[in-house]
Amino acid sequence: MGIESWHSMLKEAFKRNKDDYSKMVTTLSPEQLMRKFDTGYGGHRGAPFTAWGDKYVYFPLVYDGAEWVGCAPRNPCDEALEHQGGE
């Protein structure tokens, strides 16, 4: 956790999922996408969003003030998701 932007976190999530970041469609404005914020506990929140890739839908997750990017398959498939959020 630290100072990040949705741009950097989404780019990493797209890479991890082998999704094409250059084709992303999102509700974030360019300013919201690039704005840096504290993703740690009690930090300043990033803007709410939904983002669509070819394979996944992405959205913000928060637990106890910490923020990160969550995702779910865009289309029905046999991929089971783990519980989202904190333990």
Image (spheres, rainbow, N blue to C red):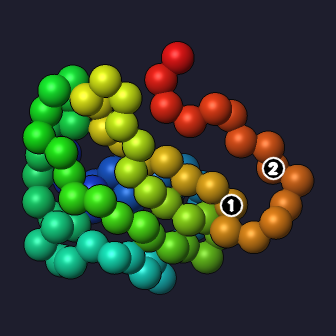
Q: Please, what secondary structure does the residue beneath circle 2 have?
A: loop
Q: Mark 2: which amino acid?
A: Glu
Q: Can residue 42 be seen here?
A: yes
Q: CA distance from mark 2 to mark 1?
A: 8 Å
Residue 39, numbered circle: none
Quadrant of res 72? bottom right
User: Residue pushed farthest right?
Assistant: 78
The residue under the point 82% across, 66% down is: 76
Q: Is residue 71 left or right of residue 7?
A: right
Residue ID at (88%, 53%): 78
Classed neighbour count for the residue bearing mark 2: other residues with Cα under 10 Å, few (<14), some (14–19), many (≥20): few
* Residue 41: x %, y % from top left: 21, 24
Q: Is residue 12 visible?
A: no
Q: Are marks 2 and 1 in contact (CB under 8 Å)?
A: yes
Image coordinates of residue 79 in percent, x first then y, are 81, 49
- The image shows residue 50, relative to residue 30, as above or below, that is above
Q: Quadrant of residue 65?
A: top left
Q: Please give the name of the residue rendered at 12% of the width and 72% of the height, measured from the top-left corner.
A: 31
| Farthest-out residue, top | 87
Residue type pointed to by label 1: Pro
Q: Is residue 64 left or right of residue 36?
A: right
Residue at horizontal 79%, vertical 43%? 80
Residue designated by label 1? 73
Foreground residue among 69 and 85: 85
Estimate the x, y position of residue 15 in percent, counting from the top left: 50, 57
Please tell me how many numbered marks the rendered image carries. 2
Give the position of the N terminus as an image quadrant: top left
Residue carrying label 2: 79
Mark 1 lies on a secondary structure that is strand
- Mark 1 nearby-residue class (10 Å; few <14, some 14–19, many ≥20): some
